[in-house]
């Protein structure tokens, strides 16, 4: 039975020319993020107390973490306030700036070398790789939403984004920071798949990436030692397996309910207990119950983020939300997997919890974008069209434009009645 397609000229009594109608933001997502930040500040103080005493101030690290949380809140308010589609025009600029900063870490007197790695601008003050991750998601969301069907072509649609991902990952791996390079690369590849890349193309790419990673492990002795320590942490518990071995002891010592806040012992032996290995500290003091609550919170964040992506009518907003959610979820998964000796040590922090100013600020900025997208599920509308190569993407029917791309099968699979969107048109012209 045919029916008329609902027009976009009227939304809740407002004309499209008046601009998009904002909806209430996703408060649950915001509260979950605040919960993780609060847990992080408490645990950073607990895990870094002994090391901070050596600097003459037991609050040294937690004060820095709290300051970064305040700065991150400011970044969140900015990305939450400015309509998300206006960030689209800054994608290329942000990506170029990220590349420049990633190169700058290798310049003497500009980048700093700490523990054998060049990852920071200044003396551990800013980590460009954290900016690169967010800018890559923003850039890919713009490129992949511009011409949806090009992603089906390897040479024209898939290869250019792959080159960008490869350049960023190579610069980060050179620092060296293999964990962040893998998170960045994995996020980019997942976003390509969500945008509609052919499965056979993605299978070949994943195979190639696996081969390159294996080759890098074989050629770099310290990486091979980490892999061997992963296979048998107890065999090398005084060298490469030291962190993982003590992390397992901490998780086992916590039992079901934990030893109590501040009562953990392994934090005194685990290097970087307040950053990469903060999860075992939580496990020892809060027990299995505490770690399960943490896993549930990250799972809820992932569900809220992908729900925002599913409900967004705008291709750019949907891909941006999916990319940010993937970035947060993948990083949390990798960190927990390392702490439980499920994968080799990669040096990836736990989002919102581990100490690290750059990571916290930019993760909060990413959540601000997610909250922004949740506020505008209809996208920019007629009055807020894009000002680049798509002057007004809604001059043509938005439904045809979105569904003609292959991403419709992966990012628009929620039934119409659940997403509150117009139904799809059958091949014969009738509406379902």
Image (cartoon, rainbow, N blue to C red):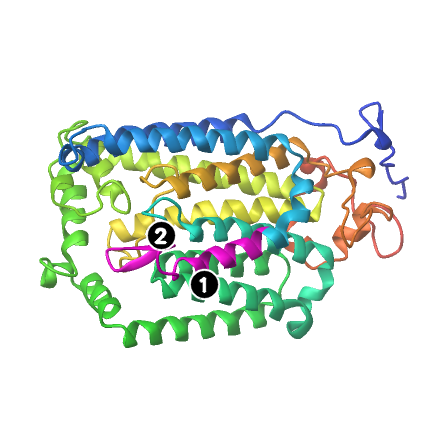
- Please tell me how crowded label 2 is: few (under 14), some (14-19), or many (20+) other residues with Cα within 10 Å: many
Q: Quadrant of residue 284?
A: top left
Does residue 432 appear anywhere in the picture?
no
Q: Name the residue nearer the viewer: 360 or 314.
A: 360
Look at the image and say whether residue 106 sits in the magenta stretch.
Answer: yes
Q: Is residue 261 above or below residue 100?
A: above
Residue at image coords 32%, 40%: 354
Q: The N terminus appears in which quarter of the rendering?
A: top right
Picture disc at residue 334: 2
Q: Position of residue 72 (x, y in %)?
A: 46, 33
Find disc 1 in the rendering and name its residue. Answer: 169
Q: Name the residue nearer the viewer: 95 or 24.
A: 95
| Count of labels in the image | 2
Q: Which residues are magenta?
A: 94-119
Q: Position of residue 32 (x, y in %)?
A: 44, 30
- Please tell me how crowded label 1 is: few (under 14), some (14-19), or many (20+) other residues with Cα within 10 Å: many
Q: Position of residue 192 (x, y in %)?
A: 58, 60
Q: Position of residue 78 (x, y in %)?
A: 57, 32
Nearest to N terminus: mark 1 or mark 2: 1
Left or right placement of residue 164 versus residue 15 in this view: left
């Amino acid at each position: 039975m045919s029916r008329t397609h609902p027009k976009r000229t009227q939304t809740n009594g407002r004309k499209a020319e008046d601009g998009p109608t904002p909806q209430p933001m996703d408060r649950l997502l915001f509260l979950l993020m605040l919960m993780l930040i609060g847990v992080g500040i408490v645990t950073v103080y607990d895990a870094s107390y002994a090391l901070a005493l050596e600097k003459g101030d037991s609050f040294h690290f937690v004060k820095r973490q709290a300051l970064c949380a305040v700065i991150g809140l400011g970044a969140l308010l900015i990305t939450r306030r400015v309509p998300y589609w206006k960030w689209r025009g800054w994608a290329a600029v942000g990506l170029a700036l990220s590349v420049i900063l990633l190169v700058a870490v290798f310049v003497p007197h500009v980048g700093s070398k700490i523990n054998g790695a060049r990852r920071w601008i200044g003396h551990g003050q800013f980590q460009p790789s954290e900016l690169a991750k967010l800018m890559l998601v923003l850039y890919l969301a713009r490129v992949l939403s511009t011409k949806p069907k090009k992603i089906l072509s390897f040479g024209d649609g898939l290869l250019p984004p792959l080159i960008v991902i490869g350049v960023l990952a190579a610069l980060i791996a050179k620092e060296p920071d293999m964990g962040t390079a893998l998170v960045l690369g994995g996020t980019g590849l997942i976003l390509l798949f969500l945008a509609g890349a052919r499965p056979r193309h993605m299978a070949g790419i994943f195979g190639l990436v696996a081969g390159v990673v294996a080759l890098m492990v074989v050629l770099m002795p310290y990486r091979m030692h980490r892999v061997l320590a992963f296979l048998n942490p107890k065999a090398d518990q005084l060298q490469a397996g030291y962190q993982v071995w003590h992390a397992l002891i901490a998780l086992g010592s916590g039992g079901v309910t934990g030893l109590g806040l501040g009562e953990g012992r392994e934090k005194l032996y685990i290097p970087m207990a307040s950053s990469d290995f903060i999860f075992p500290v939580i496990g020892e003091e809060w027990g299995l119950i505490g770690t399960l609550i943490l896993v549930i919170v990250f799972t809820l964040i992932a569900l809220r983020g992908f729900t925002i992506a599913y409900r967004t009518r705008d291709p750019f907003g949907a891909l941006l939300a999916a990319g940010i959610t993937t970035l947060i979820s993948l990083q949390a998964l990798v960190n927990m997997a390392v702490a439980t000796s499920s994968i080799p040590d990669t040096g990836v922090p736990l989002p919102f919890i581990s100490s690290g100013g750059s990571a916290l600020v930019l993760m909060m900025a990413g959540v601000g974008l997610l909250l922004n997208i949740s506020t505008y599920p209809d996208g920019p509308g007629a009055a807020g069209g894009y000002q680049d190569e798509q002057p007004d993407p809604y001059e043509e029917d938005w439904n045809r434009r979105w569904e003609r791309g292959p991403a419709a099968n992966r990012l628009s699979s929620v039934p119409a009645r659940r997403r509150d969107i117009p139904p799809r048109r059958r091949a014969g012209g009738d509406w379902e």
